[in-house]
Image (cartoon, grey):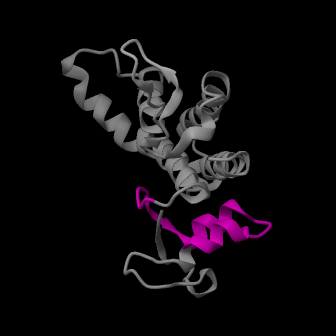
């Protein structure tokens, strides 16, 4: 990942946290208190703790090996993996993380609703900026256009020209507003 890809990833993810769902949802108190701050915090963590590793990130669960650094056993350093960073971050964000087994259902419900939104923002931005992996589904063209009121940038429009879920070429302008997208 280069600096331009990182900037695009961050921009897309933050925009999605603010406008990736209908206005009623993103303006909701819980979304405002959980999703937006969590996505912002993720990028603060990346820049504070993984500044030198960002260029090695390839996708949600792939990072180039760093042959210049060795672990305790003399093996090249692997990671960090974005999926692991997000999972670790949820230790602090899911209010039911430290509760007992009786609260497991509450933990799962929170994760399904809010954790999935946070992951969707981070992963969709990464997939579009670096390497599409079909890891995020359920968004429409209108959702993306709402995120970019000044016009959807070419780098966001272009991946859809490669293939869609039916594996045929599709141009952004030909996708209906309610057309489902996968990233």
Q: Return the residue found at the far right.
A: 150
Residue 143 in the magenta stretch? The answer is yes
* Residue 29, quarter of picture: top right
Classify 138 as above or below 163.
above
Q: Which residue lies furthest to the left in this view?
A: 102
What is the magenta range?
133-159
Q: Nearer the viewer, residue 25 or 143?
A: 143
Q: Where is residue 80 in the image (x, y as percent from the top left)?
A: 48, 30
Image position of 174 with respect to 128: above or below? below
Q: What residue appears at the point 58 percent right and 32 percent down from the top-left corner?
A: 42
Q: Image check: 36 left or right of 148?
A: left
x then y, percent, for residue 20: 58, 56
135 up-or-down from 172: above or below: above
For residue 4, above or below residue 97: below
Can residue 94 be seen from the camera position used here?
no
User: Where does the image place residue 64, in percent across and percent down from the top left?
Assistant: 49, 40
**Of 181 and 63, the residue lying toward us:** 63
Of residues 99 and 56, the one nearer the viewer is 56
- Queried whether the magenta region covers residue 61, the answer comes back as no
Residue in the image at 41% along x and 56% along y: 135
Q: Which residue is drawn at 50% across and 30% down?
A: 67
Which residue is most to the top?
Answer: 72
How many numbered discs? 0
Is residue 118 something one can see in this rendering? Answer: yes
- Dividing the picture into quadrants, the one containing residue 107 is top left
Left or right of 166? Residue 1 is right
Q: Position of residue 55 (x, y in %)?
A: 63, 40
Which image quadrant is residue 156 in?
bottom right
């Amino acid at each position: 990942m280069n600096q331009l890809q990182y900037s695009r990833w961050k921009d897309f993810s933050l925009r999605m946290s603010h406008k990736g769902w209908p206005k009623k949802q993103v303006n909701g108190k819980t979304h405002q208190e959980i999703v937006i701050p969590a996505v912002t915090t993720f990028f603060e963590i990346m820049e504070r703790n993984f500044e030198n590793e960002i260029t090695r990130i390839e996708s949600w669960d792939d990072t180039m090996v760093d042959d210049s650094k060795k672990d305790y056993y003399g093996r090249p350093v692997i990671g960090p993996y974005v999926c692991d960073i997000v999972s670790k971050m949820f230790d602090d964000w899911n209010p039911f993380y430290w509760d007992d087994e009786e609260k497991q259902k509450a933990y799962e419900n929170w994760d399904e609703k809010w954790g999935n939104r946070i992951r969707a923002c981070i992963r969709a931005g990464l997939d579009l900026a670096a390497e599409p992996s079909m890891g995020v589904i359920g968004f429409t063209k209108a959702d993306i256009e709402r995120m970019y009121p000044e016009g959807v940038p070419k780098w966001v429009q272009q991946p859809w020209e490669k293939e869609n879920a039916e594996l045929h070429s599709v141009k952004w302008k030909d996708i209906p507003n309610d057309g489902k997208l996968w990233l």
